[in-house]
Structure formats: C-alpha cells, structure tokens
Image (cartoon, rainbow, N blue to C red):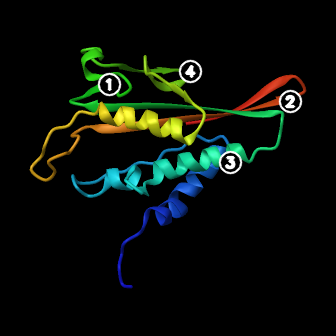
Amino acid sequence: PGSRYADQRYVFETFGQRVLDNAWAGYHCCLFAYGQTGAGKSYSMVGYGVNKGIVPISCEEIFMRIASNKDPLKRYEVMVSMLEIYNETVQDLFIPMDKRPKNGLQIRESKALGIYVDGIIKSAVDSYAAIEKAIDQGTSNRSVGATQMNATSSRAHTVITIEFRQVEDLNGKEAVKLSN
C-alpha cells in the first residue's frame, strides 16, 4: 500500500507483453534500459534469482507460445546473441575474453540485413533452458570494473538479441516472419 514498487511480472505485463505481441506479428522490437549506475537496469531486464526480469519472462513466453502451436505447416527458429560495448569496442560475449579479437567486432550495414554486427555468434536455442544457459554464459564473460557507486558494475553496455523466425509452408513456398 502506497508503494511505488512494481514487481517483475507487472513490468512484463505492462511493457513486455505488448513488445512480444509485436515481435510475434513480425516486427523488429527493442526493450531498452537506461539509467544511473545502481538504478536497477540489470535487475529489471534480467532479474536476480527467482525474481526473473523482463528478458527471461519474455523468453519463457516465446517457448510457451511455440509449444501451443497446433499448425503442422508452421515451425519456429530462435537464435540468441549477446554482445557488450566497452570502451567503444564491440565484443561477442559468447567468446571468452582471452579469445576475443583485440579490436572487437565491426558494425556494418547492408540493404538485405540492415545494421548488424559482423562475426557475432548466433546460437540456436530450442527451449527456455537453452536460452537461459546461453545468457548465463554471456553474462560470465562480461567486463566488470568497480565504480564509486557499484562495486560490481559492468561499466559496459550489454545487448541481448533474440532472433525469432516463424516459417510457414504456403503451398510449397516458405513465408517467413523475422523479428529481433
């Protein structure tokens, strides 16, 4: 009573559900957290322990929707990638620090793909458990450096991309809706 606290499920139902509905319709969507160190960006997006954030809740929902599909002519493909921007260098978080290219990855643009990161690893996932494992792997490879406000701050910007394809067989031809 009187509290301005919004639990993780409320945040998902208020914002994440609409974003996910648009992604399911084939639109490219983005959830973005911005704020001062220690403001709760990571907590809101990823969560902590049993308090899953908007990203894991959205991923669970994607796989629940896939599981509820009864159309044998429709299939789904889900890929995840994870990168960080640290000191103006883009790095793939699925690559351990000691194996990353020194100058990072390049951001490119093409008419066919739009803006993309050249060389980023996209891992195919077939369940929420697989996506959770991939995100945990990426999180363990983040750059960390203490700030005066947060001893475990990453001091980097993290981008998790979920590429979601719905492929439907229409009289022998594939129709694809791609969201990321």
Disc number placed over residue 170 in the picture, else none? 2
Q: Secondary structure at mark 2?
A: strand
Q: Earlier in the sequence, mark 1 or mark 2?
A: 1
Distance from disc 3 to disc 4, alpha carbons, whole Å, reads 31 Å
Q: CA distance from mark 2 to mark 4?
A: 26 Å
Picture coordinates of residue 53, whole percent (x, y): 43, 54
For label 2, the crowd category at 10 Å Cα-Cα, with few meaning under 14, some 14 to 19 and many 20 or more, is few
Residue, disc 1 = 91
Q: Nearer the viewer, residue 72 or 28?
A: 72
User: Which residue is painted at 50% across and 37% down in the image?
Assistant: 131
* Mark 2 vs mark 3: in front: 3
Residue 118: x %, y % from top left: 43, 18
Residue found at x 63% / y 51%: 21
Could you say where residue 35 lies in the image, as x and y percent from the top left?
28, 54
Which residue, given by chain and number where applicable, does mark 4 sit on? 111
- Secondary structure of residue under mark 3: helix
Pointer 3 or 4: first along the chain: 3
Position of residue 82 in the picture relative to residue 98 (left or right):
right
- x, y percentage for residue 63? 62, 44
Asked if disc 3 and disc 1 are in contact, CB closer than 8 Å, the reply is no
Comparing marks 4 and 1, which lies closer to the viewer? 1
Amino acid type at mark 3? Arg
Q: CA distance from mark 4 to mark 1?
A: 23 Å
Location of residue 160 with respect to 3 vertically, above or below: above
Q: Earlier in the sequence, mark 3 or mark 1?
A: 3
Image marks 3 and 4: residues in contact by CB distance under 8 Å? no
Residue receiving disc 3: 65
Marks 3 and 1, how far apart at CA: 32 Å
